[in-house]
Each structure stands twice: as C-alpha cells, then as structure tokens.
Amino acid sequence: MSMHKKLADIQQNLKAPKGQFNKFGGYNYRSCEDILSSVKPLLGDLVLTVNDTIKMVGDRFYIEATASITDGETTVSATGYAREAEAKKGMDASQITGTASSYARKYALNGLLAIDDTKDADTRKPDDNTEQVKSLRAVIDGLDADKRKDVEGWIAKKYGDIEQMPSDVIERLRERVA
C-alpha cells in the first residue's frame, strides 16, 4: 500500500476528541498530546515525528513545528507556526516557549492528519448577542484593573473583540467573573 494511501486511511479513521476543557473560556479543546495518543494506534509500520525550530521574524520569536510521517521511503510533512508571547502572567521564558511549541505542534499535526477545527466554538460565526455583550461589558468594567486587563486580554487573544464571542461563552465568562 502506498504511503499516501496509508496516510489517507489514518486521516479517515482518526478520532481525536476534544478531551480538555478550558474553565476560564468555557470551551473544549484537544491538545497535542491528545492527537498523538489518538493517532499512535493507527500508525502501524509508519513513523510519526514532530520537531520544532525557533525563528526570528522582525523582533519576535516564532516556533516553527513540522509534523512528518514516513514509511522509510516516502515522507509527508506539514508545518505549523506560533508566536511566543512577549510576556505571560505567571510564566517564565521557558514556559512561554513551551506553550508556543505545543500550539505550533498541534497545528502541524492538524494539517498533516486533516483534523478540521473550523467547527470549534471559538471559531464559529458570532451570534446576535448585543444584550449579552452589554451585560458582560458592565461586569468587566466593575472589575479591578488587573483582573479587567486579564479578561480583556484573553478576549482579544481568543476572539479579537467581545462582539465576536459566541453567546454561550459570553454567559459563562460573565458568570465566572461576576
């Protein structure tokens, strides 16, 4: 059987559920480790590797992760990227690099294994949530400066702005920070 046929079989049979839950954001997700655990039983005689390199782009560091699968003769690869945060509260530099590495590896694996994240709650089309947005803004405005900065930073990173958040996430976040 050809390498591409073996990879297609893996892609069709892979079940990598979102077994993790982000309590702060109120959504399910899958980690790099979840994907690796799910794919290992399907590999047979194929070898899967994931490697990182650090690249400087402008004045920022990016992690370039490459996921490759080979049968010893033919290799198929996919690449994912993640930018290191300048700073992340409660993390030292090595932890920041580690989170960027994990993120980049996950998206390299997504590309290689045809894992589609377009149906994620955090990437779907926003709801008509005007009243919920107003309510959440009021709660956020009442927070102390540090907590407000954390919440607003998370919203900006995850959704761009509050209007892009799904209604169910707005409700969970409002309840959590109220």
Image (cartoon, rainbow, N blue to C red):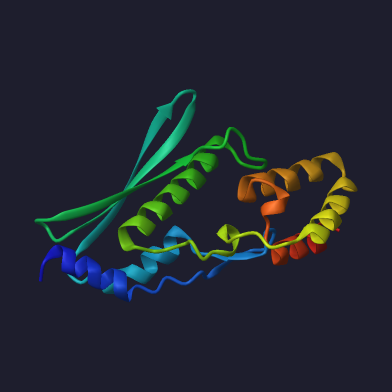
Place of residue 16 in the rendered image (x, y in percent of width and height, measured from the top left): 42, 70
Q: Residue 15: x percent and y percent?
A: 39, 74
> Looking at the picture, does residue 146 appear above or below residue 110?
above
- Which quadrant of the structure image shows residue 165? bottom right
Q: Residue at x 51, y 69 (%)?
A: 18
- Specify the quadrant that holds the N terminus: bottom left
Image-quadrant location for residue 10: bottom left
Residue drawn at x 27%, y 54% as measured from the top left: 49
Above or below 32: residue 102: above
Nearest the eye: 137 or 105: 137
Asked whether, in this view, residue 127 is left or right of residue 18, the answer is: right
Say which residue appears at 46% left-offset and 31% top-offset: 61
Residue 29 image offset from top left, x and y in percent = 54, 64
Q: Depth check: 110 or 131 in front?
A: 131
Q: Residue furthest top?
A: 59
Left or right of residue 111, residue 7 in this image:
left
Could you tell me residue 125's position as x and y percent? 60, 60
- Left-right relation of 130 to 23: right
**Identity of the residue drawn at 14% across and 61% down:** 71
